[in-house]
Amino acid sequence: MEIVLKYFSDFTPKQLDQFRALAPVYKEWNEKINVISRKDIDALYEKHVLHSLAIAAAADLPAGLQVLDLGTGGGFPGIPLAIFFPEVQFHLVDSIGKKIKVVEAVAEALNLSNVTTAHSRVEDIRNRKFDLVVSRAVAPLKDLWHWSKPLLRKGAPEHQPSGLLCLKGGDLDQEISESGCRPRMVNIYKLFPEEFFQEKFVVSVK
């Protein structure tokens, strides 16, 4: 938890309690259903929580925004972002049922009223539009953008974050070239100068 507080300081007591509760809740569930690798669970706050919050450091999400977390896995980046932005609505979706079961349990344990979940493939989401799609290393940028586009509301205000915000790592030149997108890149290492974040980026497609 200290590593999160190193970079963010203005949490309410409720947010602090929720962030602190993440470790015991995930450890308990990880023993039943392995959603986070054994070696990563001890580095939960750096490799999962702070990594997810790179999106919060790169973009301010206004109250009322509707955000889809595509392929949320164990709840990242959606759960940390839902704690950080309590006035924003997050819909966390994954095609693997046991992962969504863990996400639902975590959201319930933390009393996160701004989180909804669905055990679904993103292609099967109907009759819903979102202001923003977030994702973490789920698929190539080309696929993420292809899945996101039909679900995005048109005509977002210029100042409001919109489109796709995803967490990516490594050399992305070929992936970006194949996507046909012209993303904006934020180097996470410049936000959080920790060794783990070298060559990791927040990739934004409007």
Image (cartoon, rainbow, N blue to C red):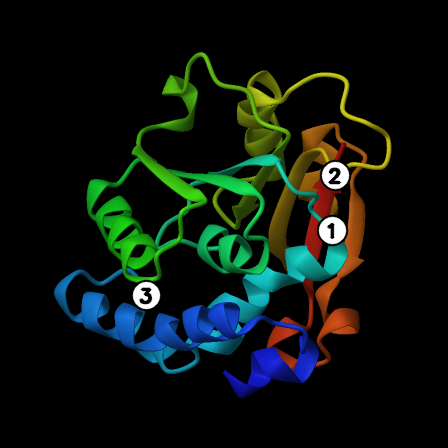
Residue at (74% x, 47% y) in the render: 173
| C-alpha distance separating marks 1 and 3 | 27 Å
State which tag comes first along the sequence, 1 or 3.
Answer: 3
Instruction: Identify the residue under disc 2.
Output: 161
Check disc 3 and report its element: helix, strand or loop.
Answer: loop
Residue at (66% x, 84% y) in the render: 6
Residue 68 lies left or right of residue 189; in this view the side is left
Q: Position of residue 34 (x, y in %)?
A: 22, 63
Identify residue type, mark 3. Ile
Closer mark to the observer between disc 3 and disc 2 = 2
State which tag comes first along the sequence, 3 or 2.
Answer: 3
Label ID, residue 36? 3
The reply to whether dot 1 and dot 3 touch (C-beta < 8 Å) is no
Neighbours of disc 3 within 10 Å: few (<14), some (14-19), many (20+): some
- Of 194 and 107, which appears nearest the observer? 107
State which tag comes first along the sequence, 1 or 2.
Answer: 1
Identify residue type, mark 1. Asp
The reply to whether dot 3 and dot 2 touch (C-beta < 8 Å) is no
Asked which quadrant contains residue 194, the reply is bottom right
Label ID, residue 11? none
Q: Position of residue 184 (x, y in %)?
A: 81, 45
- Residue most extreme to the bottom: 2
Q: Position of residue 17 (x, y in %)?
A: 43, 74
Instruction: Identify the residue under disc 1.
Output: 60
Closer mark to the observer between disc 1 and disc 3 = 1
Check disc 2 and report its element: helix, strand or loop.
Answer: loop
Q: Is residue 151 visible?
A: yes
Asked which quadrant contains residue 22, the reply is bottom left
Check disc 1 and report its element: helix, strand or loop.
Answer: loop
